[in-house]
Image (tube, rainbow, N blue to C red):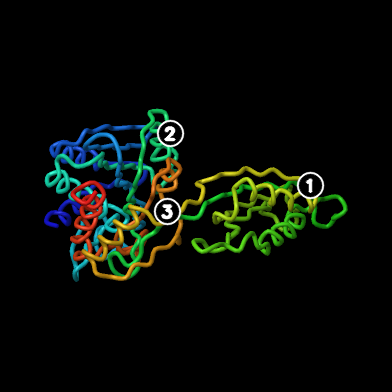
Amino acid sequence: MAGVVELTCELIRRVSVTPVDEGCQALLAQRLAHAGFTIEHLRYGDVDNLWATHGSGGPVLVFLGHTDVVPSGPFEDWTSNPFVPVVRDGHLYGRGAADMKGSVAAMTLALEAFVREWPAHAGTVALLLTSDEEGVAHDGVKRVVETFRTRGQRIDWCVVGEPSSLATLGDQIRIGRRGSLSGHLTVNGVQGHVAYPHKVKNPIHLAAPALAELAATRWDDGNDAFPPTSFQISNIRAGTGANNVVPGALHASFNFRFSTECTAQGLRERTEAIFARHGLDYDVVWELSGEPFLTRDGALRRATLTAIESVCGVAVDANTGGGTSDGRFVAPLGAEVVELGPVNATIHKVDECVNVDDLERLPLLYREIAERLLGANG
């Protein structure tokens, strides 16, 4: 669709490293207001969120994206300035090209075209943007959804613009995500000289068997939509810096990516039972980033698959792989959630890029999904 490359470039030029938006949302809000959308800016703390709606009542179709990007790293590692977009060899390069300013630009153009063609469409079509997806994600979509709950705002269908594709646009979509539960563990011991083991309690020695048991535990067998729950230790810290001192405490961080066969509460209870069985003097702080969710066959999945077949003509793998997305906050509202965006091969990397042909087809995909749900075929 004409203009998507140019709009993506305009967004890339804005150095919106999380949680800074750097005017991206204001630019898009101005365009959508001109197209007849009602605009609401929801700012929580240092985070900008945009809620743009057209139409009224249900059903409600939301396109969800983020304007923040991860840091670029040293500029000299890039072939060209990460915030000066450039097209080379059929690809648009720049931080956020794939994750996810290209999708945000495509969603904006798709919505403009959709309401121009279907000004009296069924229900409500909306764009929800945040500048807090790549960061701690406390004041972004999570906070917006809390506001929506208070208002009674419904969402029936949600298309997340995360870069889901594997080799070419549309060959892979996400129809759910695993839950993410992190634990921050402190194991207490007694500090002392290594030459007097009877006077110390070494928290490293005490914690090691428990951590080993956690790593060896099979938490579930997964199911037809999810792989088995995984457990990974991401950090262990202990020691005073001297090799002749037993430390007084060990700190460890770990994470569960869990299927619908487990619950966060069940994982917490099983983990703490292991700590207790090993006799640890411990504290653990739990952080639940999101529950698992799954969108089964329904109107949104059918519209998405049909649109991909029409626009891209590729076979689609619909799965629940990858990390987490802001879809985890929207799904508990009862929404069907699908993630569809460009190829994810370069996201968060040096020389991040998106295929220009894919980028130009992406607004057509988003527009067709909207038409099938809320337009003539809605």
Question: In front: 198, or 299?
Answer: 299
**In the image as oriented, which residue stretches furthest toward the front?**
377
Camera-near label (3 vs 1) is: 3
Residue found 35% across the figure and 56% down from its top? 301
Q: Which quadrant of the structure image shows residue 21?
A: top left
Per the image, the residue denoted by label 3 is 295
Q: Secondary structure at mark 2?
A: helix
Residue found 32% across the figure and 37% down from its top? 49
Mark carried by residue 146: 2
Question: In front: 226, or 345?
Answer: 226
Q: Secondary structure at mark 3?
A: loop
- Give the x, y percent position of residue 2: 11, 56
Q: Earlier in the sequence, mark 1 or mark 2?
A: 2
Q: Earlier in the sequence, mark 3 or mark 1?
A: 1
- Give the x, y percent position of residue 347: 35, 60
Per the image, the residue denoted by label 1 is 190
- Left or right of residue 151: residue 189: right
